[in-house]
Each structure stands twice: as C-alpha cells, then as structure tokens.
Image: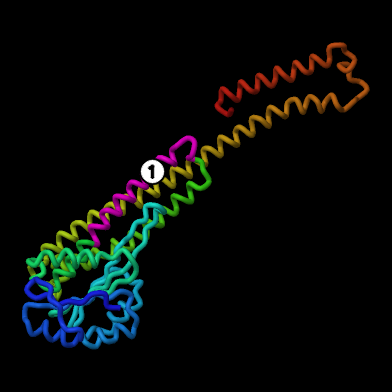
Amino acid sequence: MIVDSAIYRDGHRTEGPDDLSDALAEARASGNAFLWIGLHDPTEREFDLVTEEFGLHPLAVEDALKAHQRPKLEVYDDSLFMVLKPVVYEPDSDTVTTGEVMVFIGDCFVVTVRHGEGSPLAAVRHHLEGDPERLRLGPTTVLYSIADATVDHYLEVATELGTDLEELEAEVFSPNVGGSRTTASRIYTFKRQILEFRRATVPLSVPLTRLAGTGPYGTVPFVHEKAQPFFRDVNDHLMRVNESVENLDRLVSDVLAAHLAQMSVRQNDDMRKISAFAAMAAVPTMIAGIYGMNFVHMPELNWVWSYPAVILLMVVLEILLYRLFKRRGWL
C-alpha cells in the first residue's frame, strides 16, 4: 500500500495529483522537483501500477516484492536500485531483527519500499522536510538520508550489543553462575544475534563505496556529485560499525571458549573429588571385606581388642587419606 506520496519542488513539499502518471509528469515539467512515493509491504498487483508508471526494471521489481535480499546497489538504464537492512534491537529479549528498505531513484522520482518493522523512512521524510537546502539536491538526498539513518542506528545497536556482551562475560566468570548449563546456550544465541547483525552491515560497504565515488567502481548515475562527500561520511561510520561487529564476534568466541574451558576444569575438579571419595571409601570396605570372610584360622578374631583396633585403623587411614587429598587440592 502507498503510505505517503508528495512532490518536492525547490526543497518544499507540495501535494501533487493523486494519479501517479500526472504527478510524475508534473514533477518532470517543473525541472526542479521530484516525486517521492513510499510503500509498505506492497502486493504484486499494487506494485504493477508503480512499475508501469516509473518504468522500473523487472529484476529490481522482483527483488522489491520478494524481499529477503542482501544489501546491494544495482544500476539500470532508467533508475538506481538499492537495498538496505535496518536493524531493530529488542532489549527485553536481547534479540536482533532486521527489516528491509528498497529504494528506487531516477531522474525525478524516488520510490521507497519497506518490508518489516524498524524502518527509518518516516523519520527521514520528516527530517528532510524541515531542511529544504538538502532537499534541493533531489532524489540523491533521499537515498543518502535513508542510508545515514540506517547506519547511525547500526552504531546504537552495536553499543547495546557491547553492553550485553559485558554482562554475559561477567556471568561466565562469576564463581556462582559460570558453570550454569544455560550459559553456553545463551552465548551461542548471542553469537547468532551478532551474525544476524553482520549480515546487514558487512555487505553494505560496497554499495556505499560506489555511491561515494571511491575505489575502482567509478561514478554512479543519478547520484548528485555534491552528495558524494556525504556518502563517504556514511561509509566511514559503516566502517566503524563493521569493526565493532568484528570485535564483538571475536570476543563472544573467546567468551565461549573460556566458558568451555571453565566447564572442563570444573568437570575435572568434580572427577578428582569423586575419585578421592571413592578411594577413601575403598579402604574401610577392603578391611571389612577381609575380616568378613570368616576363615577359621584368623587369630585377630580371637583378640579382645580386635574390634576397636580395626575401627581405629580405619579412622586413622581415612584421616591420612583426607589430609593427602586435601593437600593436593582434590577436596
């Protein structure tokens, strides 16, 4: 469904005709205007009209309808197509979810398609409408602003994940909780969240590099040359995000390895304790077994002090074994 549609003339919003063909014709006739249409989870039938009026490439349209795309930038004859993946962090459940924003820009139009939640489009449109100077740069400004808002939110999510990792690390090395059976599961779940976050941030580097006009890619059509420094700034922020993601991924792997090592040491300690108690139990069992065989020729059975002597022997041996195991750290 179309959630918003307007013509931006000389940096200011003006309401255009309801018919998309008339609105696009009016924007083109003005010379200094462009049409911005926003859609949310459109069906194929709803998108057919937009495709026909704006002449969008069928492959880009297919990607926009099916969603589940990696961040990318595609250049076609009449338009530019870019996919971004906004990220939403749920602090209550410590989970990362991603949405998708597809942006088509042409000579005098912008079509944005949103899938899922967490999209910055509404805030971007509101912010741009309060800054006519930026809007005068045309459709490129919309693309830059969406990318900028998306990457800025990446930085916030990276900070939140860093805080959660510190809490998880403290839990792992806590003497009371570090051996919990659920800790390894929590670490693995956290690693999955970082992987989901990484799928949104890492592939975006190449499209932003192309839009910034740097590297071996050359210039991209439909991108205003004055906007290239802004895309470079966004790409710099994205590099910081990717470095944070790499650090988080490496740290959580180290935390998992430390937890497994800690569990292994604790299991070894438990086995030593079990072995020590088994050895202490074996001594009186052996002595009782010997004197429980009831042989006829066992002179100790006829002694008056046989019973207290055997009990005393058992106690002394148990004390010696206990002190030995205690000195070696087994108990």
Q: Is residue 105 visible?
A: no
From the viewer's perspective, is 42 left or right of 186? left
Identify the residue at image location x=14%, y=73%: 139
Q: Is residue 56 magenta?
A: no
Quick one: quadrant of the N terminus? bottom left
- Secondary structure, magenta segment, majority class: helix
Q: Quadrant of residue 74?
A: bottom left
The answer to which of 149 and 10 lies nearer the viewer is 10
The answer to which of 13 and 146 lies nearer the viewer is 13
Q: Is residue 247 visible?
A: yes
Determine whether the residue tagged by mark 1 lies in a helix, strand or loop. helix
- Above or below for 81 versus 195: below
- According to the picture, the residue beneath numbered tag 1 turns out to be 167
Position in image of residue 289 (x %, y %): 81, 28
From the viewer's perspective, is 41 left or right of 297? left
Position in image of residue 151 (x %, y %): 23, 60
Identify the residue at image location x=56%, y=25%: 328
Position in image of residue 314 (x %, y %): 74, 20
Answer few, some or many: residues within 10 Å of disc 1's Cα (few below 14, many 20 plus, some between 14 and 19).
Answer: few
Residue placed furthest toward the right: 296
Residue placed furthest toward the top: 304
Which region of the structure is painted magenta? 150-178
- Above or below for 88 versus 115: above
Report the colour scheme: rainbow
The answer to which of 211 and 108 lies nearer the viewer is 108
